[in-house]
Amino acid sequence: MTPQQRRKHNGALSEVATATHKRYLGRPELLTGIQSAWIKSLLTIWGESVCGGTAPRKPTSHSCWKMQKGMRWSDKALERFTAAIEQAREEGFSGQQALNRAHAILWPKASSSVIDTAIHDDDVDFVEQCVLNAFDSSDPIYVVGVSYYTTRKKISDITRELQRLAPWLTSEQARERVKWCLQIFRSKVFLSARTI
């Protein structure tokens, strides 16, 4: 983060910290369970594509050995691993390339069609447009929502940031303010999605 971005971020969090009630941040539209689940799923897809994904990574290269460090390999697992290495060598791979090919055999990538990719990209573009229509980039709700959905930060991480800037807040008060921001963020994005 650049110093200017850091100042904007800290300023927005300070504004959130000074809010004593949810209505000072904005009026959230109460969403039904289905509406809330729908917008949460779209925002999660958007956040993962913007930040590069939050799913746990599959083991790569030698980490397949590290993953089992301290654990006993079963005979079946050893046979699968040995067969994958042998198959990679039969295909003409050697060294690191053989390990990469064995990795691809043991943990194949999920195939995605061009249509699935296009649908995913359309969803991401749609949510991006909704978020940009609903908020100004200096809005504290926007800062907290983007921080939550596009980074690997959890509510507790944002709560700690908020407490660092506003030490008079208890942990529960800071957590409550972050939850207010996320609720307002989701409701405004949902309303923006309905109008587009």
Image (cartoon, grey):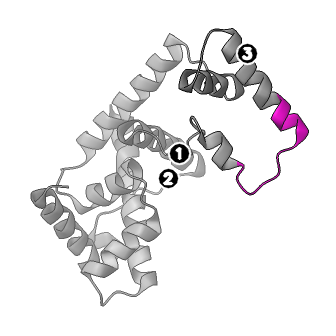
Picture coordinates of residue 193, whole percent (x, y):
37, 37
Instruction: Determine whether, in the image, residue 75 is placed left or right of residue 71.
Output: right
Picture coordinates of residue 144, whole percent (x, y):
32, 60
Q: Residues within 10 Å of mark 3 (few under 14, many from 20)?
A: some
| Any part of residue 49 in sight | yes
Seen from this angle, which residue lies furthest bottom? 168
Query: Which label is found at residue 83?
Result: none
Residue ID for mark 3: 87
Picture coordinates of residue 58, whole percent (x, y):
60, 38
Judging from the image, what secondary structure is the residue with disc 3 in? helix
Tell me the kind of residue under disc 2: Leu
Picture coordinates of residue 148, whole percent (x, y):
39, 56
Judging from the image, what secondary structure is the residue with disc 2 in? loop
| Any part of residue 177 in sight | no
Work out whether mark 2 precedes mark 3 in sequence or the reverse, and give the earlier one: 2
Quarter-wise, where is residue 97 in the image?
A: top right
Label 1 with label 2: CB-CB less than 8 Å: yes
Query: Mark 1 or mark 3: which is in front?
Result: 3
Of 110 and 138, nearer the camera is 110
